[in-house]
Amino acid sequence: MHSTFLMLLFCASGLNAPVPEEIEAPPPNIILILADDLGYRELGCYGQEKIKTPNIDQLAADGMKFTQHYSGAPVCASSRCVLLTGLHCGHSLVRNNWENGGWGEDEPEGQYPLPGGTITMARMLQDTGYATGVFGKWGLGGPGTSGAPEHQGFNTSVTVLCQRKAHNFYPTHLWKNGEKMLLDGNEWFKAHQKIDKPLPEDEDYYDRYLGQTYSPDVFLDEALDFIDENSKKPFFLYYPSPIPHVALQVPVEELNQYPREWDDKPYLGGSYLPHPRPRAAYAAMITHLDKEVGAILDRLEQHGLSDNTLVMFTSDNGTTYAGGVDHQFFASTEGLSGLKGSVLEGGIRVPLIARWPGKIAKGSSNDFPSSFPDMMPTAAELAGIPFDLPIDGESLIPMMTTGSNPQRTHDLYWEHGDQQALRHGDWKLVRRRLGKKNQETRLFNLATDAGEKKDLSEERPEILQMMMKRAITSRFPSPIFPNKALDSLHDQQ
């Protein structure tokens, strides 16, 4: 009887016990991996047949591949500015590469700095409680300037601040949270050298152009530490790798995963550094980046964070034409026209892979025309941040999570030097050599002509006129990066 009374009392107390409040799930983590000069078809999941990228290919198999994604610009600094501010290069501050110094050892470092108070993606997330970290190549302000990452919303930063310094993967130093970080075993040497004849491929050759500490390895170690330190709170990890931007430099032991028969002649240098096996070196660099992606994904898994993390992988622009890179051998931009520096598709169409387990369908793809200005509103929606800033992009979360492909509400726009391009729907306007006697204006329909082979400007004058008007109203002049040809059109409005 006593035991029965206790059981009844226990059951009765259970009926009246307070129901614990539902624990609110933490906001998703965000990891944005940015390759440097990686071409549209240089990953296996985008059709590459020679270069091994198993981890990135698995990322695509576990998530979504965007087939019509665009960088912010065809060169580094302006593209990164678009990425972090959500403003395309008709509205953004940085519209081209700008140098603060020369190539000497003690020259001032850095590109045009973002001003203090700039609302970057990192600052937006930091202000709502995210831990923010950047590890890799920066390019938006040198040491001690307002543009340095510690002044642009990043709690933790380990970067090569200056793009010129990034031309050598064995620099003497990096910058960690505003302080110079010396790298063991690395001595300064010119990042652009030319030799008259091939050197013997032996230790002497590599001793000239390598050091002890490979900077991408430092960035990876620091990024993994950042995940470890912030595994209990929401974080934004921006990983702008310097790979595969030239110079061709990779640890020697990684070359032999690719055939010696690939390289029938060495690259003697001139623009960037010489290399005896340029094709193998380029492929090995991309495979090195792939291993870094695998390490980051493994670290997420170790902390049980994979399901609550959106991982995105993209590139700042298309494949380069310089430094011994053989884009034809690798079919880096097969089916597309142009390379880095061009507003044609090969210069700006880049991979975008997104993985968010349980939210993004495995092995899916989407041909929504997306671009770098979309990244900031995407991060805002993911983090639950009300977003009412002037912006040139739109959140990709609906496309990622439902597979939908709606009509874009924002045109895609680029300008670089004497070039301008605008995409509206499937139509693309390309204007080149502006302000010169041989300037050209062409119109393409990308739905049927991704290679931009057939100019429709004469056949469809009404579309051309519409696109020209949209291009004119898509920009305003920049006093910092003046563009006479485009600014004069703005003045005529």
Image (cartoon, rainbow, N blue to C red):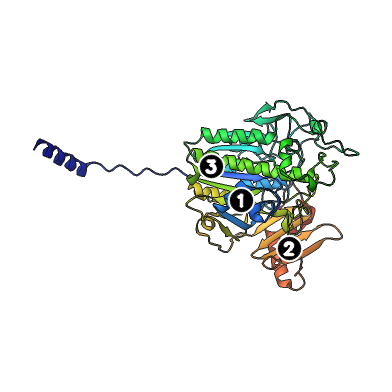
In the picture, the quarter occupied by the C terminus is bottom right
Q: Residues within 10 Å of mark 3 (few under 14, many from 20)?
A: many
Residue to which mark 1 is pinned? 57
- Spatial distance from mark 3 to mark 1, Cα to Cα? 29 Å
What amino acid type should be assigned to the residue bearing mark 2? Gly
**Foreground: 35 or 370?**
35
What residue is shown at x 58% (from left), y 64% (from top)? 407
The residue furthest bottom is 459
The residue furthest left is 1
- In terms of secondary structure, where does tag 2 sit? loop
In the picture, the quarter occupied by the N terminus is top left
Of circles 3 and 1, the one toward us is 1
Q: Residue 289, image x and y in percent?
A: 66, 42
Q: Which mark is residue 451?
A: 2
- In terms of secondary structure, where does tag 3 sit? helix
Vertical arrangement, residue 107 with respect to residue 291, above or below:
above
Residue to which mark 3 is pinned? 125
Quarter of the image where one finds residue 394 = bottom right
What residue is shown at x 27% (from left), y 43% (from top)? 19
**Foreground: 238 or 112?**
238
Q: Residue 228, image x and y in percent?
A: 52, 34
